[in-house]
Image (cartoon, rainbow, N blue to C red):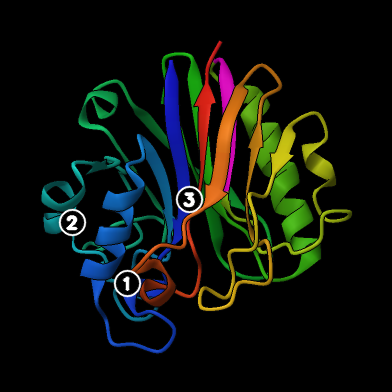
Amino acid sequence: MTLRIASYNLHKCRGLTGPHAPERNLAVIAALKPDIIALQEVDFRYGARPEALPRRLIAETTGLVPADLTGRTGENSLGWHGQTILMRPDLAEQAELRRLPLPGLEPRGAVALRLPGLTVIAMHLGLARSSRRAQLTRIAAQAARIGNGSLVMLGDFNEWRDDRGLEPLTGYRLIAPGPSYPAPVPQLRLDRMALSSCITLHGMGVFSDDPARAASDHLPIWADIELP
């Protein structure tokens, strides 16, 4: 099976400074044509944490459907701790979702998607490196317990260094397709993926076509993979 996987921090669908314009983010996702995409910051941060990405527009704009995530952060939230996963409808029919609470100075969590032969763990790690190390340690331990065949971990790692902070992922193939932050003039490789060694990587990149540079403070990353 060959899949295009992607990760995209939406920044609450307000570009760098606003206004709230989710149609731009949806246009970016549609242009990417992913089979599975991990999204961060899909909900507003304060109050009842209502969805910033309107779920009613997702399928008609992108052809994807959001994960059926029981226990969302709030009654009107799209995700859990601001995260969700979109996927092709045929994949959603086989999907099993789990929430993975994470340690750290601020509330964080990961979302695990289990499909036949593939587990995808989406994450948005903390701002402190000590928290990120602890969170990756927890995720790696959970992955070993719940993993189902090949494993992909992806998201906003909030880590700009390649030589430190990622030690818990030893044994995985770490990829950072390129600078993805800040979107108008990207300098830092904050968005990353970690792949099981058995997965074949056919291509990867940072998507910077219009309107990606204006839709969020991050650019989305993607990879084309083949499962054994």
Residue lying farthest to the right in this orientation = 163
The Cα–Cα distance between marks 3 and 2, rounded to whole angstroms, is 18 Å
Across and down, in percent, residue 44 comes to 34, 75
Q: Amino acid at mark 3?
A: Ser
Quarter occupied by the C terminus: top right
Q: Is residue 146 visible?
A: no
At a point 35% along the width and 67% down the height, the residue shown is 210
Mark closest to the chain's N terminus, 2 or 1: 1
Query: Local crowd at mark 3 within 10 Å, few (<14), some, or many (≥20)?
Result: many
At a point 64% along the width and 63% down the height, the residue shown is 179
Magenta residues, start to end? 149-154
Place residue 41 in its image quadrant. bottom left
Which residue is the site of mark 1?
A: 49
Place residue 25 in its image quadrant. bottom left
Which residue is the site of mark 3?
A: 7
**Residue 153 included in the magenta stretch of the image:** yes
Across and down, in percent, residue 189 comes to 68, 61
Which residue is the site of mark 2?
A: 55
- Circle 2 SS class: helix
Q: Is residue 115 visible?
A: yes
